Image (cartoon, rainbow, N blue to C red):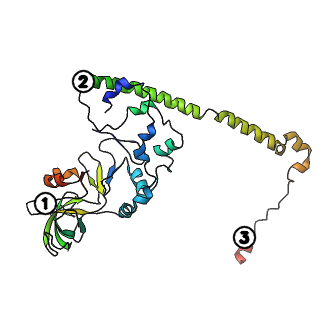
Amino acid sequence: MAASSASKLFRAGRSLLGGLKDPNGSIGMSKDLPRSYLFSQQQRTFIQMRTNLKVVDNSGAKRVMCIQALKGKRGARLGDMIVASVKEAQPGGKVKKGQVVYGVVVRAAMQRGRSDGSEIKFDDNAVVLVNKQGEPIGTRVFGPVPHELRKKKHVKILSLAEHIA
Amino acid sequence: MRLEKCWFCSSTIYPGHGIQFVRNDAKIFRFCRSKCHKNFKMKRNPRKVKWTKAYRRLHGKDMTQDSTFEFERKRNRPERYDRNLAENTLKAIKKIDKVRVDREARHHAMRMKGKKAMERKEAAKELEQSIHMVKAPAALQQEASLTLPKIKVKVSQEQSQENRMEE
């Protein structure tokens, strides 16, 4: 990190305030966080039967409801596969309302441990629709997705994603 | 391995510690411990919470402008590994750390410089203004009006056994 620093020991310092912007840039915090605030006020739990999830791809579905988690006794978590029923869909999409589809949970409000021991959580519960083989139905993925999907062999979703967290 | 800074208190987050929250616009908020995470959930502004680094810097409690801070900075371009450079860096870290600690101590000393004189001045002023409230012990003995008069209070007699039975 500080590899090139040795020779610069006594170089005249630039104002540090510029570098500190990140932790301090929070004046407008209360303004731009109301939704996540509401989310975090309740205890978030597993994705189980009847959980509504946002669909974050261009398959045509907008909202699905989980009808079965394919892993875990208590429900699905970040990165797990679920079976869902399409509750809202755009007209002319690849999937229709009422269809039963498979999906990968790409964002979950419940925190999940990472391999290094830290934890990660997201704003909402979101899913990317896939077929039975795990290949995505849509051709785009919106919003951030976790890098744990690589471990779950969903590399295609990762490559389509805008941001990887 | 990268040592991140806590979004709330600006302390270092070592690998395996804390929790990170990813907002839907992909901004990542990292927290060193649940204390910071909870404060974030309560929508507290770190600039207004006294124990955070942001507050201390904003209010001039800590040294803010110093060349030693330049070295500890996030660099997005990975440096090509060079054994000699790594060795020199490790040596320099100790030296830089020492310089920084010394400068911080000096900053603290400068900040606290006028405090003792001010305290003494205030004590002298108080003494001058309210010395009339203090009386010497000898004066108190001579002048009876200065002390509260002693009053004899009668202690009620304990009731006899029979009376209590009647009641």
- 3D distance between C-alphas at marks 1 and 2: 45 Å
Most distant residue in the left direction: A133
Q: Residues within 10 Å of mark 2 (few under 14, many from 20)?
A: few
Q: Which chain carries label 3?
A: B
CB-based contact (under 8 Å), mark 2 and mark 3: no
Q: Residues within 10 Å of mark 3 (few under 14, many from 20)?
A: few
Q: Mark 1 lies on which chain?
A: A
Most distant residue in the bottom direction: B166
Q: Is mark 3 on a helix, strand or loop?
A: helix
Say whether mark 2 and mark 1 are on the same chain.
no
Q: What residue type is labelled 1?
A: Pro
The answer to whether residue A164 is left or right of residue A102 is: right
Q: Residue B24: percent from the left, percent from the top?
A: 30, 58
- Residue position for label 1: A136
Q: Residue B62: percent from the left, percent from the top?
A: 51, 38
The answer to whether residue B125 is left or right of residue B78 is: right
Residue at point 33% right, 53% down?
Answer: B21
Say whether mark 3 and mark 2 are on the same chain.
yes
Quadrant location of the N terminus of chain B in the rendered image: top left
- Residue position for label 3: B161
The residue closer to the viewer here, A154 or A90, is A90
Q: How crowded is mark 1: few (under 14 residues within 10 Å), some or many (20 or more)?
A: many
The residue closer to the viewer here, A133 or B64, is B64
